[in-house]
Amino acid sequence: MKKFLAVFLLLLSTLAFTQTHTVESYKIKSGESYTISFSQNEDVEIALIVTNLSVANILDIAIVGAPEDAKAILDGVELDSLNGHFSFLPNRPYLKLKGHGDFKGTEFKIANMSTRKHPATALLKIVKFRKNRL
């Protein structure tokens, strides 16, 4: 009986914390923006993957409104904030930003700051990892 109880408790503790994810993709043209919102009930970690679809022009994006304590990793380098201005050279396969922090109840915006004279479209993939407790 003790062995059964130990196995049962181990199984229960394993199931007590699961993680699911969703992936969203958007194209953001020069001068456009996209807003990402999280409810108070979401316990979320996100990964942003941004690709410059232009073969000739630099893509400039700005991220504003992310939590101040959220950290970002940009090409393997940890940054102080997910908020900021980022430039992507043309023909670069991708630049990965991974955000860390408490995103409950937050809303932040990603804006394509590239000029219409030198347009560059951003392909944005957002992976939301939701931590579910049973």
Image: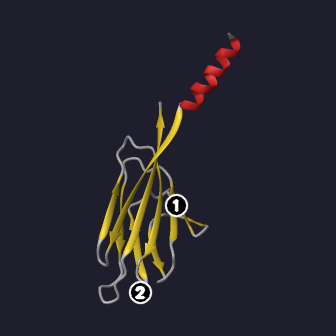
Question: Element at badge 2?
Answer: loop
Residue 35, placed above or below residue 5:
below
Identify the residue at horizontal 51%, vertical 71% (top origin). Answer: 95
Location of the N terminus by quadrant is top right
Marks 1 and 2, Cα distance to the nearest angstrom?
24 Å
Image location of residue 125, percent across then percent down = 42, 63
Residue identifier under label 2: 57
- Number of numbered labels in the structure image: 2
Q: Residue furthest top?
A: 1
Going from the N terminus, do you reach mark 1 or mark 2 first? 2
Identify the residue at horizontal 50%, vertical 72% (top origin). Answer: 94
Callout 2 crowding tier (Cα within 10 Å): few <14, some 14–19, many ≥20 = some
Q: Residue furthest right?
A: 3
Q: Which one is in front in this view, the residue at disc 1 or the one at disc 2?
A: 2
Residue identifier under label 1: 98
In the rendered structure, the answer to whether residue 59 lies left or right of residue 12 reads: left
In the image, which disc is placed on residue 6?
none
Q: Are marks 1 and 2 in contact (CB under 8 Å)?
A: no
Image location of residue 63, percent across then percent down = 40, 67
